[in-house]
């Protein structure tokens, strides 16, 4: 959530900052601002409420602000309403300290009381202004920038990534972090700072990841790193393989449609990461056959769509490897005081690798002695660095807030992990393993076929723009997929939508079905098809309009009772979710686009949820 950028070098800073912020708009924000050190040494701050374009217009695309160093921010309101006063950057008395901040300072009220007693005044309702003036207090008291930031780190509780400019230190920018993402990129005679890689891809692919409780000092000719004791430390850059075009629309109207259409390649790249000569090789992941054999139980923790991918993995893993699996919302995991048994593996799924609740769940699992496997999309992210083992999904940068290709990559990772466990534990025959492997290898072409026939879904979506309520139903893997289909629709079209296990309809939910209610039935599992068909007949008898997403071989059972049917190619039932999710993504996209909504940046949502 929120976006941070920083630049120091020889170029005019403001245009660089604005361009970087534009690449971070997907993270979600309600105001924006930049601070640039002018040629006379004064730090000029410009802020606006609303979209970044207003800030671009206000600064004449940055050309109205002169200077070669600065910081910028897009804010997601947590403390204080979204307005220009509460927007970042924040400034201390006399403009001596200027700061931007992602995260939440949990003890800000306590710190504010202390600062008030020392004569400080406050103009905003934000925890970030408190952070700014706390650093100003320590700087005035102790006289050193590094010591001021060190004492800030030791004093505050919560999560943060901060970038700080000191008025009397014109040749540097300081940064520090705890539990909020921040990277630094080194270019030629320039150093860049950002909360995510796309902001600086245009300028450099050599990136340093700042660890928790570390401080970075950016100067024109390079960057130095210190631990919380102010001891200088060595850090090696990571080379980012994404190119700048991967974070651009490439001619598509929206990032979401571009990312939907990239899914065949994402599947191929993720499969090729571990499949060598049709054998699953976890050497790069580091998960040994010995540890797999010793694993007695698996707990999967995740949030949002990653949680839904985990639910699919639960069904697949238990079915293939015959090992007990529990799927939990990461936001609830710590608070139920989990009991982790010896021989348990905790799998943490996160697109960004920075999801606050998932990171906290990972740390709790490690504290309790469990081995941890991360399924993440971002190299060098916090979850990737802290987990014992890492499966990198190969989705590339995903810009649209509503995930599509990253979810698909997580599904593929779940299949391959499940299949690997089944092979090692010998709970599946070689023939069955080969059949599923062949099915996974066919998925890219089958997804391409579904995407090439999307016009029919587009036409149907035009009829759904006035829909008020939608229910998704399914059983087993189809229920897990219904959860994702429902979330996609509600988050970008703002239509009320719920997903239910089809067998639960008679336990209360069917009372909501009336004449014209739209029900989407997902039917890809042949062993459960008759029961789900029975549930569809029930809602039809109460006046529901039924959309069915069904496997091709089940069409004879479906087409006579559904009002609109979308079929998917035949495949192994364990991996059918990767095909059935495509029409659900397309349906949500077209409904949102037809309603004229901001498909890529739905209201109130952020791409990377880095605070609780």
Image (cartoon, helix red, strand yellow):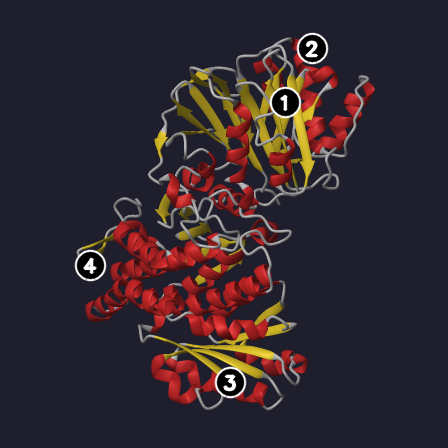
| Circle 4 SS class | loop
Q: Is residue 104 left or right of residue 249?
A: right
Which of labels 3 and 2 is toward the front?
3
The circle drawn on residue 563 is: 3
Q: Are marks 1 and 3 in contact (CB under 8 Å)?
A: no
Give the total number of marks visible in the rendering. 4
x and y percentages locating residue 52 in the rendered image: 61, 39
- In the picture of the structure, the residue carrying the numbered disc 2 is 141
What's the CA distance linking mark 1 and mark 4? 53 Å
x and y percentages locating residue 332 in the rendered image: 59, 53
Q: Residue at x 24, y 51 (%)?
A: 281
Q: Earlier in the sequence, mark 1 or mark 2?
A: 2
What's the CA distance linking mark 4 and mark 2? 64 Å
Q: Earlier in the sequence, mark 1 or mark 4?
A: 1
What's the CA distance linking mark 1 and mark 3? 62 Å
User: Which image quadrant: the N terminus?
Assistant: top right
Q: Residue at x 71, y 20 (%)?
A: 92
Does residue 289 show up?
Answer: no
Q: Residues within 10 Å of mark 2 (few under 14, many from 20)?
A: few
Tell me the quarter of the picture where residue 512 sits: bottom right
x and y percentages locating residue 357 in the rendered image: 56, 47
Q: Tell which of 327 and 25 is nearer to you.
A: 25
Q: Is residue 412 left or right of residue 110?
A: left
- In the picture of the structure, the residue carrying the numbered disc 4 is 278
- In the picture of the structure, the residue carrying the numbered disc 1 is 152
What's the CA distance linking mark 3 and mark 2? 73 Å
Does residue 375 show up?
Answer: yes
Q: Residue at x 55, y 56 (%)?
A: 599
Q: Residue at x 36, y 41 (%)?
A: 242
| Circle 1 SS class | helix
Residue furthest to the left in view is: 277
Q: Is residue 147 left or right of residue 420?
A: right
């Amino acid at each position: 959530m929120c976006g941070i950028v920083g630049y120091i070098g020889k170029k005019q800073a403001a245009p660089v900052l604005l361009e970087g912020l534009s690449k971070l708009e997907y993270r979600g924000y309600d105001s924006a601002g930049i601070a640039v050190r002018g040629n006379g040494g004064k730090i000029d701050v410009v802020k606006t409420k609303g979209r970044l374009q207003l800030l671009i217009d206000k600064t004449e695309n940055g050309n109205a602000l002169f200077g070669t160093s600065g910081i910028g921010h897009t804010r997601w309101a947590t403390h204080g309403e979204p307005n220009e006063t509460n927007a970042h950057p924040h400034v201390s008395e006399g403009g001596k300290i200027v700061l931007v901040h992602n995260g939440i300072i949990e003890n800000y009220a306590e710190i504010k009381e202390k600062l008030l007693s020392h004569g400080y005044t406050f103009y905003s309702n934000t925890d970030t202004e408190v952070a700014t003036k706390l650093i100003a207090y320590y700087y005035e008291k102790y006289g050193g920038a590094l010591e001021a930031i060190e004492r800030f780190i030791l004093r505050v509780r919560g999560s943060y990534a901060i970038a700080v400019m000191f008025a009397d230190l014109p040749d540097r920018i300081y940064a520090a972090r705890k539990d909020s993402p921040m990277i630094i990129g080194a270019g030629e005679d320039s150093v860049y700072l950002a909360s995510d890689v796309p902001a600086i891809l245009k300028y450099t692919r050599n990136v340093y990841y700042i660890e928790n409780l570390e401080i970075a000092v950016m100067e024109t000719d390079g960057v130095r790193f210190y631990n919380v004791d102010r001891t200088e430390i060595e850090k090696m850059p990571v080379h980012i393989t994404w190119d700048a075009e991967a974070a651009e629309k490439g001619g598509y109207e929206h990032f979401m449609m571009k990312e939907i259409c990239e899914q065949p390649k994402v599947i191929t790249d993720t499969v090729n990461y571990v499949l060598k000569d049709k054998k699953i090789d976890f050497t790069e992941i580091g998960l040994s056959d010995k540890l797999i054999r010793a694993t007695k139980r698996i707990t999967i923790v995740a949030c949002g769509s990653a949680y839904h991918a985990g639910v699919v993995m639960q069904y697949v893993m238990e079915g293939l490897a015959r090992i007990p699996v529990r799927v939990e919302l990461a936001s609830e995991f710590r608070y139920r005081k989990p009991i982790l048994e010896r021989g348990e593996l905790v799998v943490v799924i996160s697109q960004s690798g920075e999801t606050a609740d998932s990171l906290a769940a990972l740390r709790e699992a490690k504290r309790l002695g469990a081995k941890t496997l991360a399924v993440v999309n971002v190299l060098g992210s916090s979850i990737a660095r802290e987990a014992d083992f890492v499966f990198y999904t190969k989705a590339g940068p995903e810009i649209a807030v509503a995930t599509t290709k990253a979810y698909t990559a997580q599904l593929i990772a779940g299949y391959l992990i499940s299949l690997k466990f089944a092979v090692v534990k010998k709970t599946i025959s070689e023939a069955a393993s080969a059949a599923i492997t062949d099915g996974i290898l066919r998925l890219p072409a089958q997804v391409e076929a579904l995407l090439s026939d999307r016009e029919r879904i587009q036409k149907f979506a035009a009829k759904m723009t006035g829909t008020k309520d939608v229910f998704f139903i399914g059983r087993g893997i189809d229920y897990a997929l219904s959860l994702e289909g429902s979330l996609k629709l509600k988050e970008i079209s703002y239509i009320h939508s719920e997903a239910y296990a089809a067998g639960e309809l008679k336990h209360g939910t069917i009372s909501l079905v009336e004449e014209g209610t739209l029900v989407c039935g997902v039917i890809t599992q042949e062993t459960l098809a008759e029961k789900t068909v029975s549930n569809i007949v029930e809602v039809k008898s109460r006046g529901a309009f039924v959309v069915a997403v069904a496997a091709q071989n089940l069409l004879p059972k479906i087409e006579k009772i559904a009002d609109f049917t979308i079929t998917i190619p035949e495949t192994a039932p364990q991996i059918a979710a990767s095909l059935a999710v495509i029409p659900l993504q397309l349906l949500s996209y077209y409904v949102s686009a037809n309603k004229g909504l901001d498909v890529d940046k739905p209201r109130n949502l952020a791409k990377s949820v880095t605070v609780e």
